[in-house]
Image (spheres, rainbow, N blue to C red):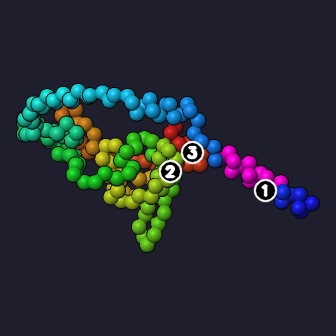
Amino acid sequence: MLRFSGIVIILFMQMMLHGCSGGVDGDTVEFVQEIKNRKSKVLEPTPALPQAQSFKYKAADFRDPFETFVVAATESEPKSDNQVVGPDLHRVREALESFPLDSLQMVGTLERAGEFFVLLRDNVGTVHTVTIGNYVGQNAGKIGKITETAIEITEWLPSGKGGLKEHMTVLPLMKKGEETSPGK
């Protein structure tokens, strides 16, 4: 049996080698010769590009349209105690300032070494830890006071006279029965 399988293997290898030893067929040789005999085409030169016109930017001294526009009260307007110039526009914005204040929910508080921290859930469902001095909401709301049941936030709202005014907002702790799903 072993001798028979050895003969079969030798015959198989001879057939494989015989298939590889054949010459190239005539159609392939003709095709290659035809391609070599073709004349090459002359390409037209690429057209010259038109000269770009220069443009001088003249609006460099104008107000940047992407900066928040705050108008201070004029001298003829009497300033009230709750109307001031505006928030610091050059500070780095914090993560919770991208959410509207009414979409944030106070879900808990923490205390560490006498300092209170607040757990706020955004409309996506992520819980963030903040403390006094952090900014929340889209109106530059700054956390001013934290208690176990609420936080006080000072926001900057339009004054109606072209400027901004400070506005105090209280965000209460959500009770278990009041909890809503994120985004509601």
Q: Nearer the viewer, residue 98 or 176?
A: 98
Residue nearer the viewer, 86 or 26: 26
Q: Is residue 10 magenta?
A: yes
Disc 3 crowd, CA 10 A, few/some/many (<14, 14-19, 20+): few
**In the figure, is residue 73 to the left or right of 25?**
left
Mark 2 crowd level (few <14, some 14–19, many ≥20, 10 Å Cα): few
Label 1 neighbour load within 10 Å: few <14, some 14-19, many 20+: few
Q: Secondary structure at mark 3?
A: loop
What kind of residue is marked 2? Answer: Thr
Name the residue: 20% across, 29% down. 45
Residue position for label 3: 179
Mark in the foreground, 3 or 1: 1
Q: Earlier in the sequence, mark 3 or mark 1?
A: 1
Q: Residue furthest bottom?
A: 113
Q: Which residues are magenta?
A: 8-20
* x and y percentages locating residue 129 in the rendered image: 45, 58
Q: Nearer the viewer, mark 1 or mark 2?
A: 1
Task: State the image coordinates of residue 172 (x, y, percent, origin top left).
Answer: 46, 49
Magenta span: chief secondary structure: helix
Q: Between tags 3 and 2, which lies in front?
A: 2
Q: Residue drawn at (49%, 53%), measured in percent from left and top? A: 127
Given contact means CB atoms under 8 Å apart, are the residues at marks 3 and 2 in contact? no
> Does residue 74 show up?
no
According to the picture, the residue beneath numbered tag 1 turns out to be 10
Quote the CA–CA distance across marks 1 and 2: 71 Å
Residue identifier under label 2: 126
Q: Is residue 129 above or below residue 41?
A: below
Is 66 on the left or on the right of 153, as rendered?
A: left
- Residue type, label 3: Glu
C-alpha distance separating marks 3 and 2:
14 Å
Q: Tag 2 or tag 3, which sits nearer the N-term?
A: 2
Q: Looking at the picture, which amino acid does disc 1 mark? A: Ile
